[in-house]
Image (cartoon, helix red, strand yellow):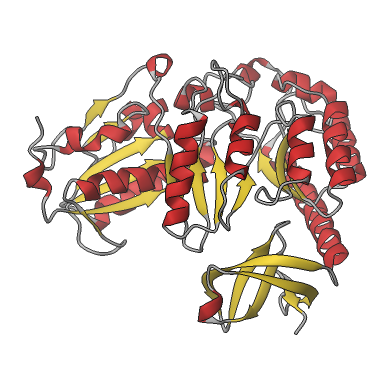
Amino acid sequence: MIDYTQFQNKKVVFHTLGCKLNFAETSAIAQQLINNGFTKVRPGEQADVCIVNTCSVTDTADRKGRQAIHRLVREYPNALMVVTGCYAQLKPNEIAQIKGVDIVLGANEKFDLPLFISQHEKLKTAEIHTTKINQVKVFQPTCSRDDRTRHFLKVQDGCDYYCTYCTIPFARGRSRSATVAQTVKIAEEAIEQGAKEIVLTGVNIGDFGSGSNESFFDLLRALDTINREVRFRISSIEPNLLTDEIIDYVANSHHIMPHFHIPLQSGTNEVLQLMRRKYNRELFTQKVERINKLMPDAFIGVDMIVGVRGETNELFEQSVQFIESLNISQLHVFTYSERAGTKMLEINYSVNLTERKRRSDILHKLSDKKLEAFYESQIGKEQVVLWESKRKGENMTGFTRNYIHIEKLFDKKSVNSLETIHLSKWNVDHSALTIKQ
């Protein structure tokens, strides 16, 4: 039994790196500790426990994790230093060697923090508590609010795909989720607390309900029946799991926004096969064209990875040409990073770092071109915007249903409210559109 009275008046500070899924999980961990007597403090304030939730999607993420831990150890020399997240699951011994770290928790242990920090003071040698990833089966649905107005609802975790470049399955385990009813309940609780927009997030959300008789489509239909003023956005969803029935349903939905984030990763079938992706570019084209036909104003963001092993200059050029041909809104460009234990390391052809950067720069410029064209196409149209609490000088910002970034003079009464507006010209720094007064 844990003596929870020991946590009364204890202060905890959090530092989260990586994806929105990590932020949602940190929020759940924080709430658990608060419920058990802890007080959450802001960065820089004195704390008894410091918890670092790490990312490990690339070598750069690992390095940023180490840098953050070193900095936080210096900032909180007397706090119990706890490190969890993907980096902690993949390389616990590496983290345990960092001076000042006390406890390293894996994917299965991070939601049992009170158990591991009970009775602990600073330790001379770090303790490691991890479970082999193939034994991790627990799913913890969570919902967090960012520093604006959006909420992020974790609907799924893990991945069964094992793409050759990716370590996520080794860090988060097999695909798993709660039931539709359980997930809807959490969404309803967030709405009761004031949520006007909820982003559905996870590792592979289209795989929701894997192993059960429920599906991601079932979840969307259930959320769409909530009789409240709320918007839902679908985060990244695999092209092969973005079914035509989902696209058709979103086209006629009031609650689910015309906003898609679809990972392509490469514009050539040769590289997609090297990556062991579960689709080809013809399927991807079909999905984009269907969205364009049913929702001409829909925002379509696309993930791309440049410089993977086996991607020759010729294949990269073909990939660029394919992207140019697609009617999409923006690219999210990632530079390939070698990851230990992945099958891609078995491919001999390697792209040097200078060339990887060159390719990244090309796609970033193409992304800017696509995004500007999409914004230009929306000027003069009527949209509904959700105003956020974040200020930008004298202005406030918000996003339309189709994810257009909007600015207007700050009005406190508008925060977390929906407003029908007409899109006008670009703002001063060309980062958002303004509204017609």
**Residue 222 percent coordinates (x, y):** 59, 37
Q: Is residue 289 left or right of residue 27?
A: right
The residue sitting at 78% across, 74% down in the picture is 422
Q: Is residue 345 among the parts visible in the rendering?
A: yes
The residue sitting at 58% across, 23% down in the picture is 214
The residue sitting at 38% across, 15% down in the picture is 135
Q: Is residue 17 among the parts visible in the rendering?
A: no
**Residue 127 percent coordinates (x, y):** 21, 29
**Residue 87 percent coordinates (x, y):** 42, 34
Q: Is residue 227 left or right of residue 270?
A: left
Task: State which quadrant residue 321 falls in.
Answer: top right
Q: Looking at this view, is 223 or 47 the one in front?
A: 223
Classify 221 as above or below 344: below
Classify 44 as above or below 126: below
Q: Looking at this view, is 395 or 57 the one in front?
A: 395
The residue sitting at 58% across, 58% down in the picture is 229
Q: Looking at this view, is 185 or 293 the one in front?
A: 185
Image quadrant occupied by the N terminus: top left
Task: State which quadrant residue 414 falls in.
Answer: bottom right
Image quadrant occupied by the C terminus: bottom right
Task: State which quadrant residue 103 falls in.
Answer: top left
